Each structure stands twice: as structure tokens, then as C-alpha cells.
Amino acid sequence: MPKRSGIKRPTDFNQHARNIIREAAGAEPKQEPPEKNPHAVALGRLGGKKGGKARAAKLTAEERREIARKAAEVRWARVNGLAADPTDEVSE
């Protein structure tokens, strides 16, 4: 699968047309990297790093088994060409 260029195209038709004209004329479109708050980035990373471990420690063995069962059902339904909704309750 080809990688995306990462260039954000405007959703407004007129702005998109202007960018096409600028690119055709040889002018580079202005691309400003989004500014991120370094404190927010650090906080998000901190929460993300411990989130999975904290959730796993909180789950009981029965809850982990149920999550794994549902995931396996969805994977096998995808392999067999059936559309499975993971939110559906499966009766045994």
C-alpha cells in the first residue's frame, strides 16, 4: 500500500484550486507544522504508557477471557467472510 504524502489538502474547493495553481506555477504551498503543547504531549504519553498495564491489572481472569473470546470471534468471522459486530452479545 502506498504511503500518504502527509500534505493536508483544504476541504474548501476554492482554496484547493488556489493550491493547485500555486503548485503548477512552481510555488511551494505553505505547510506549517501544527504546534503542540509539550506539557500536553508529555502528559498524554505518560497516561498512554501506563494505561494498558493498569487496565490489565484491574481485569479479572474472567473479564480477560471474555475479551479474548470476543476478539477471536471477530477475527474468525472476518476470515470466514462474515460481518461480525463485536458489540453483539453471542449466546452459547
Image (cartoon, rainbow, N blue to C red):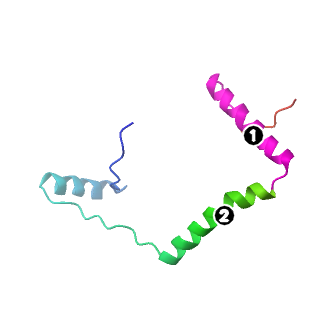
User: Quarter-wise, where is residue 50 in the image?
Assistant: bottom right
Q: Tell me what residue is drawn at x 58 percent, y 73 percent.
A: 43
Q: Tell me what residue is drawn at x 69 percent, y 33 percent.
A: 74
For this rendering, which residue is in front, 38 or 21? 38
User: Quarter-wise, where is residue 51 in the image?
Assistant: bottom right
Local SS, label 1: helix
Q: Tell me what residue is drawn at x 71 percent, y 33 percent.
A: 72
- Amino acid type of the residue that numbered disc 2 sits on in the rendered structure: Lys
Query: In which quadrant will I find the C terminus?
Result: top right
Give the residue at mark 1: 68
- Amino acid type of the residue that numbered disc 1 sits on in the rendered structure: Ala
Local SS, label 2: helix
Crowding at label 2, few (<14), some or many (≥20) Cα neighbours within 10 Å? Answer: few
* Distance (Cα) linking label 2 and label 1: 21 Å
Can the viewer see residue 83? Answer: no
As drawn, the label of residue 50 is: 2
Q: Is residue 15 above or below residue 66?
A: below
* Residue 2 position within the rendered picture, expressed as x and y whole percent measured from the top left: 35, 39
Q: Which residues are magenta?
A: 59-85
As drawn, the label of residue 5 is: none
Q: Is residue 88 above or below residue 36?
A: above
* Magenta stretch: helix, strand or loop mostly: helix
As drawn, is 48 to the left or to the right of 17? right
Q: Is residue 35 above or below residue 79?
A: below
Residue found at the far top of this picture: 80
